Image: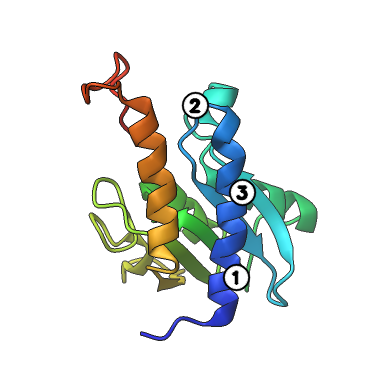
Amino acid sequence: MRIAAADLDAVGLALDEARRCADTDDVPVGAVVLAPDGAVIGRGHNEREARHDPAAHAEILALRAAAHLLGNWQLVGTTLAVTLEPCVMCAGAAVQARVARVVFGAWDPKAGAAGSVWDLLRDRRLTSRPEVTGGVRPDECARLLDDFFAARRSVDGAPREDGGLR
């Protein structure tokens, strides 16, 4: 599969957002929403820990920012680019927002809803189904996550008290 340069760039922007989690205990996932012309209209990175909000996933925050900027919850024609395969909540939000495309980096074999565990985004029963492109810059995206979780584990390899899990 040949990956478009625009998708590589979009996931690069999402990686920049994910790196903003470095000073928090948030899992480093970043997302951007691009207008049909490629302009960034929404950005977000995980802020569940920072906001004490279970819904403060990168995708949700980026979709909210884009909707606020446009003054419309319907993000028709837009692309959501994210460093990690969206979970069920985020995939559902993308469908509800009517995004045209979802582009992501690393696959999530534990909670992915774009083909790994579930395939919500391509469910034929939905009236709005975005085009999905996964595996864009997967090594960079996975490395960011792997480094984060490795740092959360104790020196002897045992999980921290909070589990050190996603």
Sequence-first tag of 1 and 2: 1
The residue singled out by tag 2 in the image is 25
Can residue 154 be seen from the camera position used here? yes
Q: Quadrant of residue 60?
A: top right
Front-lying residue, 115 or 24: 24
Compared across the picture, whether 41 is left or right of 32 comes to right
Residue in view at x 39 percent, y 30 percent: 151
Label 3 CA crowd tier, 10 Å (few <14, some 14–19, many 20+) = many
Can residue 84 be seen from the camera position used here? no
The amino acid on which the numbered mark 1 sits, given as a three-letter code, is Asp
Alpha-carbon distance for marks 1 and 2?
A: 26 Å
The residue singled out by tag 1 in the image is 9
Q: Secondary structure at mark 1?
A: helix
Discs 1, 3 touching: Cβ within 8 Å:
no
Residue in view at x 70 percent, y 73 percent: 38
The amino acid on which the numbered mark 2 sits, given as a three-letter code, is Asp
Percent position (x, y) of residue 137? 44, 66
Colour scheme of the picture: rainbow
Picture layout, residue 158 above or below residue 41: above
Residue in view at x 30 percent, y 21 percent: 154
Can you name the residue that lies furthest to the bottom here? 2
Q: Which mark is residue 17?
A: 3
Q: Which mark is residue 141?
A: none
Sequence-first tag of 1 and 3: 1
Alpha-carbon distance for marks 2 and 3?
A: 15 Å
Compared across the picture, whether 28 is left or right of 146 comes to right
Q: Quadrant of residue 161?
A: top left
Residue in view at x 56 percent, y 35 percent: 22
The amino acid on which the numbered mark 3 sits, given as a three-letter code, is Glu
Front-lying residue, 89 or 26: 26
Front-lying residue, 1 or 112: 1
Picture layout, residue 89 above or below residue 140: above
